[in-house]
């Protein structure tokens, strides 16, 4: 069994910062790509940022230069540093990790439970 647990969401004023974390635990052999997605009320889920094990990153256009994704491979954890937050960043944020379970043959895409980020004055 593999679990992803997210933390760090909450309420912040416009212009503020938050740092999200997502830790994977369980029967894990290897982790490849990690990422963050978000879904605002009434909208489709969209890419926020991804980071491969090799260090390549990809960001959604609306968060470039404001958000930074990073990872701690020793702790199976991915982070999202969010700066200069705007009301339009309000959404449920989901982490995603591509994990090869112990004894498995394929990498599976696991998802966190989601954490609410609200940007409002």
Image (spheres, rainbow, N blue to C red):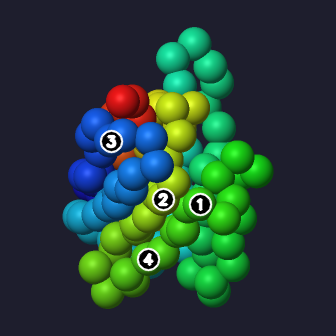
Q: Earlier in the sequence, mark 2 or mark 3?
A: 3
CA gap, disc 2 to disc 3?
11 Å
Alpha carbon separation for disc pair 4 and 1: 17 Å
Secondary structure at numbered mark 2: loop
> Residue 11 appears in which quarter of the rendering?
top left
- Mark found first going from the N terminus, 2 or 1: 1
Q: Which residue is mark 3?
A: 12
Q: Which mark is residue 71?
A: 4
- Return the x and y of residue 115 as percentages of the image width and height: 33, 39
Comes first in the chain, label 4 or label 1: 1
Disc 3 and disc 1: Cα gap in Å?
15 Å
The relative height of residue 47 versus residue 82 in the rendered view (above or below) is: above
Q: Is residue 38 left or right of residue 18?
A: right
Pick whichever of labels 3 and 1 is earlier in the sequence. Answer: 3
Q: Is residue 72 above or below residue 88?
A: below
At x 51%, y 32%, the residue is 87
Q: Is the C-beta separation of discs 2 and 1 under 8 Å?
A: yes
Mark 1 surroundings: few (<14), some (14-19) or many (≥20) residues within 10 A: few
Q: Tell me which label, 4 or 3, sits earlier in the chain.
A: 3
Packing grade of label 4 (10 A; few <14, some 14-19, many >=20) is many
Locate residue 62, reporting x and y percent.
Answer: 70, 46
Residue at horizontal 51 percent and vertical 17 percent from the top: 41
- Nearer to the camera, 108 or 40: 40
The image's mark for residue 109 is: none
Tell me which label, 4 or 2, sits earlier in the chain: 4
On the image, numbered disc 2 is attached to which residue? 83
Q: Are marks 4 and 2 in contact (CB under 8 Å)?
A: no
| Residue hosting label 1 | 66
Distance between mark 4 and mark 3 Cα atoms: 23 Å
């Amino acid at each position: 069994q593999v679990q992803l647990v997210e933390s760090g969401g909450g309420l912040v004023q416009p212009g503020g910062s938050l740092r999200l974390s997502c830790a994977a635990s369980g029967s894990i052999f290897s982790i490849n790509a990690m990422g963050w997605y978000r879904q605002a009320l009434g909208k489709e889920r969209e890419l926020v940022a991804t980071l491969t094990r090799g260090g390549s990153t990809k960001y959604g256009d609306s968060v470039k230069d404001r958000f930074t994704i990073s990872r701690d491979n020793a702790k199976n954890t991915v982070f999202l540093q969010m700066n200069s937050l705007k009301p339009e960043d309000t959404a449920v944020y989901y982490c995603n990790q591509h994990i090869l379970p112990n004894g498995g043959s394929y990498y599976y895409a696991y998802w966190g439970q989601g954490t609410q980020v609200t940007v409002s004055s």
